[in-house]
Image (tube, rainbow, N blue to C red):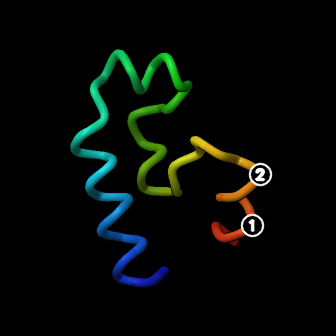
Amino acid sequence: MTLKQYQVTKKLQVTIPKKLAEKAGIEPGDCNGGIRLRPEKDSASDK
C-alpha cells in the first residue's frame, strides 16, 4: 500500500457520514482493509 492510497483511505474514513456509509454498505472497520465502494476495481488493487 502506497502512502497516497493510505491518505485517500484515511480521508474517506474520516469524511464519509455514518448514514451514507451504512447506505453504501461500508462497515466501520472496512477502511482498515480497504474501502469497497467499487469491488470490481478495489479488490484487484487490494491484493
Which residue lies at the image location 31% right of the left edge and 22% below the top edge?
18
Disc 2 marks a residue whose amino acid type is Glu
Q: Secondary structure at mark 2?
A: helix
Q: What is the C-alpha distance between the residues marked 2 and 1?
A: 7 Å
Q: Secondary structure at mark 1?
A: helix
Which residue lies at the image location 70% right of the left edge and 47% below the top edge?
39
Rendered position, 38 above or below 34? above
- Observer-nearest of 32 and 11: 11
Q: The C terminus is located in which quarter?
A: bottom right
Marks 2 and 1 close (CB-CB < 8 Å):
yes
The percent position of residue 40, horizontal first and vertical second, equals 77, 51
Which residue carries the number 2 mark?
Answer: 40
Which residue lies at the image location 42% right of the left edge and 72% below the top edge?
5
The percent position of residue 7, horizontal first and vertical second, equals 30, 68
The percent position of residue 29, horizontal first and vertical second, equals 42, 42
Disc 1 marks a residue whose amino acid type is Ala
Mark number, residue 44: 1
Which residue ends up furthest to the bottom in the rendered image? Answer: 2
The percent position of residue 32, horizontal first and vertical second, equals 43, 56
Which residue lies at the image location 65% right of the left edge and 58% below the top edge?
42
Q: Is residue 2 left or right of residue 8?
A: right
Other-residue count near label 1 (Cα within 10 Å), few / some / many at <14 / 14–19 / ≥20: few
Q: Quadrant of residue 3?
A: bottom left
Rendered position, 34 above or below 36? below
Q: Is residue 30 left or right of residue 37?
A: left
Q: Is residue 10 left or right of residue 23?
A: left
Q: Quadrant of residue 21?
A: top left
Other-residue count near label 2 (Cα within 10 Å), few / some / many at <14 / 14–19 / ≥20: few
